[in-house]
Amino acid sequence: MENEKEKSQENNEKEEWKFNLGLEKSIIIGFIILAISIILGAYIIANSISNIKIYQSSSSSSNELQLYLQTLPQAPLPNITNIDPVYGNPNSTNVIVYEFSDYACPYCDLFYLQTFPQILQNYIDNGKISWVYVVFPLYQIHPYANITSQYLTCVYELYGFNTWEEFANWSWYNQMQNISWDTFSSQQDVYNAFNEEAQALGLNVNEIDSCVNSSEYYYQIYNQENYDASEYGIDGTPTFIIAVKTSSITFQTIQQVNNALNQLKQYGLSPSVYTTPDYSYIMFEFAGALPYSFFNNILQPLVSG
């Protein structure tokens, strides 16, 4: 009988030990689950807060941009006409640069020979920006602005972009070799020099002559120039308008560009900032045959967002 009691007591102790052990395991597992839940919960909350901060930051920046745009004077996006040579594709870039230039202007030539090649290589050829050459002859300053603008426009219209570029590069290079068109004795002398180059390129000078003498593009150039001068206050060459889609940049980017532009004021230059009436573009305007480093400081943040 005593043996049976001892066995019964021993069995009860084992059962109690198993129960306590199971209870301890359950408690431990419970604590582990609770700890994991706390960690996961903290992660979810932290991640949610982080997302809220990011959203609020983005929203705040967008609001700043919209408020800033509403303070700017408004102007339409510059026209791109059939006589404006275009580098790149304005329909596929967020940044369009309009250059208002005079073929008889030595500063324009200096820009094209010293600065533009680097812009072409680093920003246009890789599709980051597009570039529009707008003919803006300064009739009152350069006596042969009329003939040079009409002649090169006819070359562009008759023979296309590549031939125009080759002819224009020859013209710009001549200007920098102390063969400025302004120094020629007469318009006919300039015309003869242009015809000689056209023949060297294998172009039909009679066809060009017919185009120039018809004054087909004179009034188009003249009227467009008056419009641009009135709309954007352009009175010298080269002048640049950099148009950027507002959807592609932030308010901080605009501040960075404005800081770079304001450096021009120490040289007596006055940059301007506009927006289109629908606020889809912001436009930065400035003038001068400026070095590549300046353009790089402007263009780099704009293409980076």
Image (cartoon, helix red, strand yellow):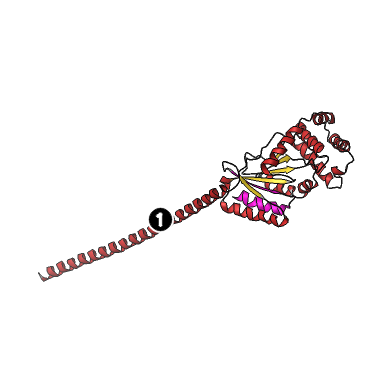
Seen in the picture, residue 66 relative to 16 is either above or below; the reply is above
User: Residue drawn 85% across and 43% down?
Assistant: 182
Residue 246 is situated, as x and y percent measured from the top left of the image, at 58, 46
Which of these two is toward me, 227 or 263?
Answer: 227
How crowded is the residue under tag 1: few (<14 C-alpha within 10 Å), some, or many (20+)? Answer: few
Q: Is residue 291 magenta?
A: yes
User: Considering the image in quadrants, where does the N terminus appear?
Assistant: bottom left
141 and 254: which is toward the camera? 141
One can see residue 56 in this view: yes
Q: Nearer the viewer, residue 75 or 248?
A: 75
Evaluate whether residue 125 shows in this view: no
Q: Is residue 74 rendered to the left or right of residue 212?
A: left
Give the image quarter of residue 13: bottom left
Residue at 15% x, 68% y is 9
**Callout 1, which amino acid?**
Ile
**Where in the figure is residue 176, as x and y percent of width and height?**
83, 47
Magenta stretch: includes residue 47: no
Percent of width and height locating residue 280: 57, 42
Q: Is residue 49 above or below residue 155?
A: below
Stretch of the chain drawn in magenta? 281-305
Disc 1: which residue: 44
Residue at position x 79%, y 46% in the image: 109
- Classify residue 278 by image quadrant: top right
Q: Considering the numbered disc 1 on the image, is that residue within a helix, a strand or a loop? A: helix
Residue 213 locus on image (x, y percent): 82, 30
Q: Is residue 34 left or right of residue 104?
A: left
